[in-house]
Amino acid sequence: MANDDFARGLVPINFNPKANAHYYRASSASDIFIGQPVLMNASGYVGAASNAAIQPTIIGVAIGFAGPQKRGLATDDPYLDASDLTTLAAGLETGDRYVLVADDPQQQFIIQEDTGATALALADQGAAIDLIYRTAADSGNTTSGIARLEIDASTVVTTTAAVLQILQLADLVNNDGTNNAVGDYAKWVVKFVTHQLGGAANAAPVV
């Protein structure tokens, strides 16, 4: 039977949130969704990686959000709405929003494979691959708050010139009771090839 189609970005596994996640001040440049990779900008704020260039130096993956003083957000949105960030300049107490980031350079994630290209095979384990959003202008679901992000099967390479390394096929069961299998919408375990806190240039401080 077919694999479940559930594009939900990067989901951390074997995860210790107390040790391997930290809050970073959010950039107001774009919306940020759960499961989306984020980057540190030149001003020290974290923002979503764009569809046009999901850059190879990532600081981690968004797993939650908070408002001023790291308390709840002012709205009930399940994602970080850029329109709610217009008061960033007002300062820490009234303006800042925070992104909780799974930022361990060795953190592993599960992510879904896309369709439309030759499907990945078990022989691709160890290779590198890039990410892709379902559509260029639609990076996340504003109802669920989840990123519409997958790995792009057409970009698999045997060098490190990509964002993620494929570690193994995920040991999961589909809704119909069949095992996750190679093919369209297969779920894979991956990690970042280059990470901003893993020895890369311009490593950013935790705030």
Image (tube, helix red, strand yellow):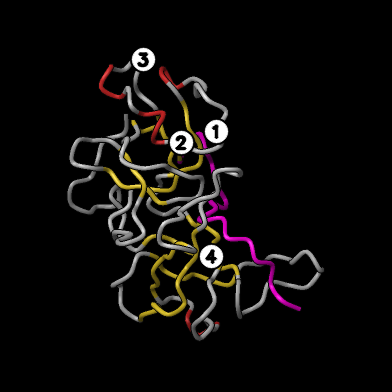
**What residue sits 33% from the left and 59% below the top?**
54
Please state which of the two labelled residues, at mark 2 or mark 4, is closer to the viewer: 2
Sequence-earlier tag: 2 or 4: 2
Mark 3 belongs to which amino acid? Thr
Identify the secondary structure beneath mark 3: loop
Q: CA distance from mark 3 to mark 1?
A: 18 Å
Q: Which residue is mark 2?
A: 80
Sequence-earlier tag: 3 or 2: 2
In percent of width and height, residue 25 lies at 33, 31
Q: In the depicted view, which residue is nearer to us: 166 or 47?
A: 47
In the drawing, does residue 97 fall left or right of residue 40?
A: right
Q: Quadrant of the N terminus?
A: bottom right
Residue 199 tag number? none
Query: Could you tell me what secondary structure mostly forms the magenta stretch?
Result: loop
Q: Is residue 7 magenta?
A: yes
Identify the secondary structure beneath mark 4: strand
Q: CA distance from mark 2 to mark 4?
A: 26 Å
Sequence-earlier tag: 3 or 4: 3
The residue furthest right is: 177
**What residue sits 36% from the left and 29% below the top?**
85
Q: Which residue is mark 4?
A: 189
> Height in image: 102 above or below 163?
above
Q: For the residues labelled 1 and 2, say whether their Cβ atoms are less than 8 Å apart.
A: yes
> Height in image: 182 above or below 47?
below
Q: Which residue is mark 3?
A: 94
Q: CA distance from mark 1 to mark 4?
A: 29 Å
Q: For the residues labelled 3 and 2, say whether their Cβ atoms are less than 8 Å apart.
A: no
Sequence-earlier tag: 1 or 4: 1
Q: Which residue is mark 1?
A: 77
In percent of width and height, residue 78 lies at 56, 36
The picture quadrant where one finds residue 95 is: top left
